[in-house]
Image (tube, grey):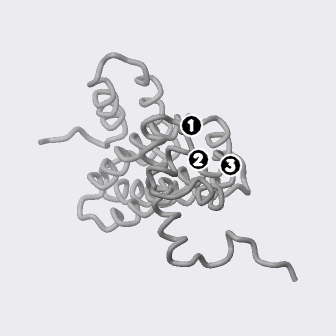
Amino acid sequence: MNEPTHANRPMRADAQRNYASLLSTARVAVSERGADIVLEDVARSAGVAIGTLYRHFPTRQDLLEAVFLDETNELRVRAEELASAPVPFDALISWLRLQMDFSARGRSMGAAIMAAKHVPGTRIHAANMAMFKAGEVLLLRAQAAEQIRTDVNIIDVIRLVYGIVLVNEHASDPDGIDRMFDLVIAGIRTKPSRD
């Protein structure tokens, strides 16, 4: 029988703390610098030695993948929490705004991470699909409440949200993202808001 790998063994409490600190620090670094994070800086900011970082994340790619997985899982959990919100439309909009923030950070993680989202069998693909399914529950609730058109699907909506981020990446108009988001939402609603 094969010896379990490091990733499959339960971590000691101090190793769990180090892992959590490195991941949290890396998330901040990625949001600021994208894939060009300096691993030594991440270790130093997390309060651990560089060897500790490499024990948990042998390569930069491993660290970026962990950041992506952590954020994707957080979005899934947030969708699951919002699934019991009293107003389905508001729950969906809140989650889509989180998607917009995630997209902006995700684009900076590099092509390999983004490509893995579309490769069945990868951890990134599995996490992405679980996140989409949790978001789909929000969409279906809003459709059942007749707040969103029934011909809309979650993949198209998320792609539209990601597209908004992409076209505004280098735009000088700080309000452009919100205006475009409002246009997309107006397009998928069953009827205009009567606020």
- Gap between marks 3 and 2, in whole Å? 9 Å
Q: Earlier in the sequence, mark 3 or mark 2?
A: 3
Give the tally of numbered discs: 3
Please state the horizontal and vertical placement of residue 39, each as a whole percent of the image: 57, 44
Alpha-carbon neighbours of circle 2 within 10 Å: few (<14), some, or many (≥20)? many
- The one of 81 and 101 positioned closer to us in this rendering: 101
- Residue 119 disc label: none
- Gap between marks 1 and 2, in whole Å? 7 Å
Query: In the image, is 33 to the left or to the right of 190?
Result: right
The extreme top residue here reads 172
Please state the horizontal and vertical placement of residue 23, each as a whole percent of the image: 50, 56
- Residue 59 disc label: 3
Tell me the kind of residue under disc 2.
Leu
Mark 2, residue position: 64
- The one of 194 and 36 positioned closer to us in this rendering: 36
Please state the horizontal and vertical placement of residue 132, each as a whole percent of the image: 52, 54
Please state the horizontal and vertical placement of residue 97, each as a whole percent of the image: 34, 44
Alpha-carbon neighbours of circle 3 within 10 Å: few (<14), some, or many (≥20)? few
- Residue for point 43% across, 40% down: 31
Tell me the kind of residue under disc 1.
Ala
- The one of 116 and 186 positioned closer to us in this rendering: 116
Query: In the image, is 123 to the left or to the right of 79?
Result: right
Tell me the kind of residue under disc 3.
Thr
